[in-house]
Amino acid sequence: MDKWEKRGRPLRLEKRFEFQSYEKTRDFLDCLGELSEAVDRFPDISFGKTYVNITLRPDADDAEFNDLDYKFVDDIDGLLN
């Protein structure tokens, strides 16, 4: 999955990240944890040896995504560089 996919019911953004080794997966998760704490935004995460699935929902059940949400997903993508 190259881009974040926006889905409804419930509203969410999803993306799968794939890695070549467990070490790279773990490094990404560590960086994601630091980023999440820095911006106080915590997505749902599932992962395996060489992949991470991230799901981001709006803060409120009836809310839409805002500019800060989209900046957060851009920052997550930036962790790969």
Image (tube, rainbow, N blue to C red):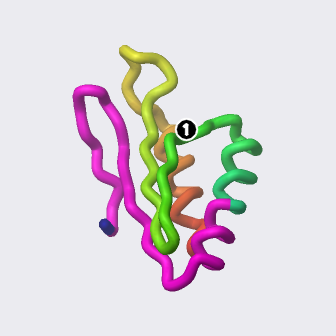
Which residues are the magenta region? Answer: 2-29
Residue 19 belongs to magenta span: yes
Dot 1 lies on which element?
Answer: helix
Q: Which residue is mark 1?
A: 68
Q: Residue at x 76, y 44 (%)?
A: 38
> Residue 76 in the image: x percent, y percent?
56, 58
Q: Residue at x 65, y 68 (%)?
A: 26
Residue 31 belongs to magenta span: no
Mark 1 residue crowding within 10 angstroms, few (<14) / some (14–19) / many (20+):
few
On screen, 12 above or below 53?
Answer: above
Q: Residue at x 33, y 62 (%)?
A: 3
Kindly identify the amino acid type of the residue bearing the numbered disc 1: Leu
Report which quarter residue 21 is drawn in.
bottom right
> Residue 67 in the image: x percent, y percent?
49, 38
> Residue 75 in the image: x percent, y percent?
58, 57
Q: Quadrant of the N terminus?
A: bottom left
Looking at the image, residue 72 sits to the left or right of residue 4; the answer is right
Q: Residue at x 56, y 47 (%)?
A: 72
> Residue 28 in the image: x percent, y percent?
62, 67
